[in-house]
Image (tube, coloured by chain):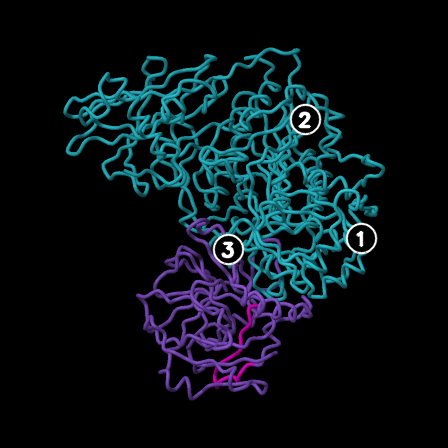
Amino acid sequence: MKNLFLLGPLAGTILAASALADDSHRHDHESAGHAGARRTQTTNALASSAAITHSASATNQLVLPPLPNGVAELKFADFFKPIGPRGLEYTDKVRALAGKKVRLLAYMARQSEPQPGMFLLAPVPLRLNEHEYGLAEDMPATLVHAFPTTETTAIVPFTPGLLLLTGTLAIGPRQEVDGRISSVRLELDPPPVAKEAAARKFSSPSQTENDRPSARQHPGGTGAVTPQNINNSSHEKGTSP
Amino acid sequence: MTLSNNCLHDHPLARWSAFAAIAGTLGISPLAEAAPVVTRLTPPSALFSFNDPTPPYIARFLEGQRFDLQATIVPDEGQAITQVGFYVDGKLVNGPVSVMPATAFGVPTNAVIYTLRAYSNKKDGVHTLEVRLRQSDNARVTAKGNFEVVEMKRGDGKRAKNVIVLIGDGLGIAHRTAARLMLRGAAMGKANGHLSMDKFSNVALINTHSLNSIVTDSSPGSACYSTGNKANNNQHGVFPDDTSANFDNPRVESIAEFLWRTEGKTLGIVTTSDVFDATPAAWGSHTQSRAAGTGIIDQYLDEMVPQGLRVLLGGGRKWFLPNTEPGTARAANSDYVLPAELASAWDVPTGAIDPERDALGDFIDAGFTYAADRAQLKAVSSKTKKLLGLFSFSNMNVAKDKIDKRRDPGAVGVVDDYGFPDQPMLDEMTLKALDVLDRNDDGFVLMVEGASIDKQAHNMDTERWILDTIEFDRAIEVCRQFAEHNGDTLVIVTADHECAGINIIGGSRVTNADLQARAASGGGAAQLRNPVVGTYETAGFPVYTIAADGYPVTTDVDFRMLIGYAANADRFEDWLTNPFPLRDSQQPFNNVPPLSLYPSGPLARDVAGDFLITGQVPGETAVHTASDIPLSALGRGASLFNGVMDNTEVFFRIMQAVSDGRD
């Protein structure tokens, strides 16, 4: 399956990728202690993912909606040049996109100590256990600090699955309030209302009516839309990404 | 009243005993009247915690080894502590006593911490330690503990000039057996050959418990060898305290610091992990937080380079880059600055919160030759006296993936995905470290860690931890040969703890081709357990072919060795070699495709066979166990190592070999 269902509008909203590509299913079901039904589902999804070779990009295989005008596609692999004797160097592409509107397909990191007004994005599901390891663990250089512009005081609830976001790109090391040093940041565009989000629903050719996820307004008041795939009951709070 | 979560003295019985001890000292009933309470007395002792004056003594030191004395005192409401003194064997210990508030979570807000730094005692035997205090209402309290100064007995007059401690992280007995079976094989009931570590003359079994748990982590598991003392999990080079600061804990002088100060011996640290990781850090830093990477790296530079650190090889470049460079991990809240009184007493810099520091540049300015890859390491001049090698951003890639790249340089392999295609093997790093350290006429202390034995055992990635054990054994062989040519060298091979409850459960009853088919069948246990797992005589004698590079041609052989995990998390198992390592959360590039396609946990791997093994532990990885681990010794003083001993005793046996009882 290479389907991607998007519930939210493209501009600045957390969008659902519910019936995901094989690899994203894999990551969504990777933790221990699932219920039996979920385990069966996981097995099937993982079995299909085994065909993916490691040299292919998972996210490249997804069918994404057309880019909005004035928005550039950005991938995690675009961030840095090959490593030299010291540290990391930004690519010309990411330098050129700094300050401009970009779109990024990413996972939201699951944090033990999330901070208000920000959340973290990664190209794979990521669990950060700051409570135990502080800042010395799980600090990938490609981690993106995302800042919802409409909500700066509430903690954004964890949302599993792939998210497609647009916002303004910023680069350059910067100390954040979470204690990390960000290298890449995304100032998210203001979210649209849920009605507009529903109107812009995107579906792939292989999508069936029953596959379509429903949408609900984010309870945290951020304006973000949290995906709910009716065929994917594992996307529940308390389960691991 | 609650103290820090990891405090030995938190146990209700311990606190009651402590109170009873105090009350007993005062000759009053414990409930008779209020009084200030000493809630912690450092160094830790069973006498203070349990009112038990009998052995084993928890804190033990060398003659003249420095350590801090500390007491946490909770005065009565509305009262203040007006006088505090530390007494050893009834005599007041001279020296400044510093005062700081207890800031740890859960400690009463009026608790106060009194510290006397860098104390030492040259008289062998068990000593009583008392803290005597007076409150503003003139109430007086005494709390009592003890510690031991270990006698260094005279031997044959021959002293070990050099000490090499090789720590296979997580290396239990079965890890060794598995590596031997893969590397040498066995037939007709006998091993066909030996590992290098098998050739050591003396063997002992080591208890590994930490100060606050039967199951240790790598911080105290490594620090027991470098300090001779127990520590709480996640802490090394220090005793626990009641402040939230990571670097102000009561310190214990390390073997490297002691031998630099007393004999001018230098220090080398070599690891396949990030150099800030707990096992190497325990040999060159003092902190209650193994995660405080910026401060640990800076302590290497600020404190240990002036105290003889001459070789530092491993991964972890991210901690050496200023926070103005992308990819840095340096952050203010993992950095260090010491209380002035601590720095003054221990004669070390106070440090600074300086995440902008270019630690890589500072190492080079301090005279270190820097190698960024294997080629540069190989090219290091034989005249080099200080060597820094940082071969990856965080943990180095494992042996299997490094070897795969060497065997097929033109192919894109795992090491390419991580961005570091030319990483040295541990034996190559060890050989270069010995070249540099051997230039010191006064001798050296070298710690070599096979780090990913543990990390891959956590992942239950069988072939990777076995190959890392083989890589570790090749580093052992380098040291063994060095000791053969330098008879005044003591070589110790041991572990910090066992990891994953590993054992060899038998051998496969099927060919690799058959196993591949079964693994793709989705048949679960009916396909992958019942007809596959050969036990007892059906296990046979698995045979692996070893290539010229010293590693198996392939680990996917017919009738292979099968490994079980007693400390396992849920996992799918198909017994096949996993094509990719589990994603390493410490790698900066782990989120860049194609790394994003690596399985991220044991449940995302080997699933096609649908053979789920339910784990006994929560989470996604196997865990450390409390079982004893083996120790092998070779060379000068090796005969001191035998029987079953506590891990801290290893430190004293090493120092026995070094000192031979001489002052």
- Proximity of marks 3 and 2: CB atoms separated by less than 8 Å: no
Left or right, A235 with reference to B22: right
Q: If the image is split into quadrants, where does the N terminus of chain B sit?
A: top left
Q: Residue at x 66, y 34 (%)?
A: B436
Choose top left, top right, bottom left or bottom right for residue B107. Answer: top left
Could you tell me which chain the residue with mark 2 belongs to?
B
Q: If the image is split into quadrants, where does the C terminus of chain B sit?
A: top right
The numbered disc on residue A138 is 3
Q: Nearer the viewer, residue B304 or B448?
A: B448
At label 3, the amino acid type is Asp
Could you tell me which chain the residue with mark 1 belongs to?
B
At label 1, the amino acid type is Val
Residue A204 percent location from the top left of the image = 56, 85
Give the residue number, with chain letter if any, for mark 2. Answer: B203
The numbered disc on residue B160 is none
Left or right, A124 with reference to A150: right
Q: CA distance from mark 3 to mark 2?
A: 38 Å
Residue B530 percent location from the top left of the image = 72, 55
Bounds of the magenta segment:
A64-77
